Amino acid sequence: MPVQLRVMCVSLMMVSMAHIPDGNRESHRSKAELFDRFARYYDGDYRDYVDDVDLILDLASEAGDPILELGCGTGRVMQPLVQEGYSVTGIDISPQLLSVARTKLANRTSADVQLVESDLTAFDLPNKGYRLAIFASNTLMHMTSSQEQTAALANVYRHLAPGALLFIDLFNPDVARLVAVNNVMELADEWEWEERGAHVLKWSVRTVDFAEQLQDTLFIYEEIGDDGGVRRTPCPFVLRFLWRSEAELMLEKCGFEVEAVWGDYDAGPYDAASDRLLFLAKKPAEIHNLH
């Protein structure tokens, strides 16, 4: 069955922007423009990364249709879900990332695929019965205050059916590692971009503010062509990292019940040495008033 790809970027962005105060709309556009810069390199950057896919597919099998992915980017996580026949809605603030996702998903098969351009705190979809919501690859950390993170979680909560699951994937804020990379320029990755006849270097510089729990990050993609020409694309962004207890309280404040906290994609226990900080939460089957 051909993919039923409903790209709702323009119309739903207008609906979503209506929920954003006038003073924040320019910030919304600026953030979208920053993430647009990643579109050229995102798939190359994540070319071999499938570590989280099996766990997400297992959760999808448990939860069922439909599925909501927050910060879907170019569709890296959506693709395997769509290939398995799940109905998936992807939300992202970047029109350029969504454009890449649209092209990739157009040749896949699924009952229903939707791509929506919106801020994660502001989208308002007709469907309020999603069975699984996913924040993959540090996406929740792109909300750079506790208020913004809480607003994103609360918005997801109201789009989920009673009993639905929420999966959140964060990096574990290892203090020693954060200190070690602070203000250090690293060659984070490199790869051959055969389609463009180029070699790509990815440089990374991070600066951490422990008081605000913020990590300012600058990725510089250096694209070296066969003719020796160099194209450099700076991609700055900020992550707000969370501690385990803080995240659990935030989830509970938004009405979720924390089902599990894992330290890896094999659902191993979380501890201080874990690479990841993974949460599985549930919207209660019986909804009670929140205080």
Image (cartoon, grey):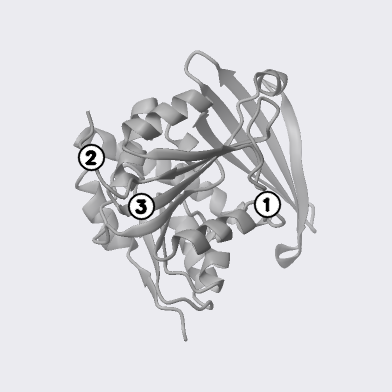
Q: Nearer the viewer, residue 192 or 165?
A: 165
Left or right: residue 4 versus residue 287 is right
Q: Is residue 143 above or below residue 224?
A: above
Residue 157 position, x and y percent, is 32, 45
Tag 1: Cα neighbours inside 10 Å, few (<14), some, or many (≥20)?
A: few
Quote the CA–CA distance across marks 3 and 1. 26 Å
Residue 232 visible? The answer is yes
Q: Nearer the viewer, residue 282 or 246?
A: 282
Query: What kind of element bears circle 3?
Result: strand
Q: Are marks 2 and 1 in contact (CB under 8 Å)?
A: no
Q: How many discs appear?
A: 3
Q: Nearer the viewer, residue 69 or 163?
A: 163
Front position among marks 2 and 1: 2
Q: What residue is at 39 percent from the left and 30 percent from the top?
A: 250
Residue 72 position, x and y percent, is 48, 54
Residue 229 position, x and y percent, is 74, 51
Residue at numbered disc 3? 163
Query: The disc labelled 1 sits on which kind of residue?
Result: Asp
Q: What residue is at 25 percent from the left and 52 percent from the top?
A: 124
Q: What residue is at 66 percent from the left and 53 percent from the top?
A: 46
Query: What kind of element bears circle 2?
Result: loop
Residue at numbered disc 1? 51
Front position among marks 3 and 1: 3
Residue 242 visible? The answer is no
Q: Is tag 2's residue or tag 3's residue first in the polypeptide sequence? A: 3
